[in-house]
Amino acid sequence: MILHLIRHPKPQVAPGICYGQLEIPAKNDKAQIERLQAALPPGLPLWSSPAQRCRILAEALHPQPVFDERLREMNFGRWEGLMWDAIPRHELDAWAADVGDFVPPGGESARQVLARSLDFIAGLSVPEAVLVTHAGVIRVLLAHFDGQVLETCLDYRPDYATLISLRT
């Protein structure tokens, strides 16, 4: 299967804010949309996170996108909406020490994000698809399909409104 992973456009949020599943608006850029449309094979089905910042891009790229909760960003729990500097240092250190399995208070781990993302992919019955999603989902999928340990997922740095194609 070939997956074309697209990260949402840059959200309208102050720098330094932790925003996993927090609803934050983003604006489409016409040039970005045209670039993505030109890069994508025509006629592919498109699935998207239902988050507003993904939804606006998905709707611009496809006449009938399908929205799926399993493509949402990592849930950072009580960290959502906080400045990274305001998160207790011991919690950030614990996360850094165990990127794959640490669960932010009230949130989910990277391994849980990977599990729900793989569950979504396992249910696809097409040879090629477009997914509009988030950096966290893209990172864990790239690490997984590159055969890397999950702890390396932070090494992947997908930019906003960019396309990464991978063969599963």
Image (spheres, grey):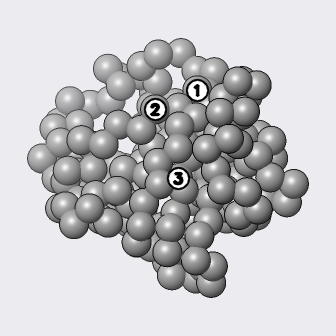
Going by the image, does 25 lie left or right of 133? right
Amino acid carrying label 3: it is Leu
Residue 56 x %, y %: 77, 40
Amino acid carrying label 1: it is Lys
Q: Which residue is mark 3?
A: 5
Of callouts 3 and 2, which one flags the residue occurring earlier in the amino acid sequence?
3
Q: Nearer the viewer, mark 3 or mark 1?
A: 3
Residue 112 sits in quarter:
bottom left
Q: Residue at x 26, y 31 (%)?
A: 88
Q: Which residue is mark 2?
A: 159
Against 133, is 68 above or below?
Answer: below
Q: Nearer the viewer, residue 66 or 105?
A: 66
Of callouts 2 and 1, which one flags the residue occurring earlier in the amino acid sequence?
1
Going by the image, does 147 lie left or right of 164? left
Q: Residue at x 20, y 30 (%)?
A: 89
Q: Residue at x 12, y 47 (%)?
A: 97
Q: Residue furthest right?
A: 63
Q: Residue furthest top?
A: 14
Quadrant in which the C terminus appears: bottom left
Against 36, is 31 above or below?
Answer: above
Using the numbered discs, state the Cα–Cα distance from disc 2 to disc 1 in whole angstroms. Answer: 9 Å
Secondary structure found at label 2: loop
Going by the image, does 123 lie left or right of 48? left
Q: Which residue is mark 1?
A: 10
Using the numbered discs, state the Cα–Cα distance from disc 3 to disc 1 in whole angstroms. Answer: 15 Å
Secondary structure found at label 3: strand
Secondary structure found at label 1: loop
Of callouts 3 and 1, which one flags the residue occurring earlier in the amino acid sequence?
3
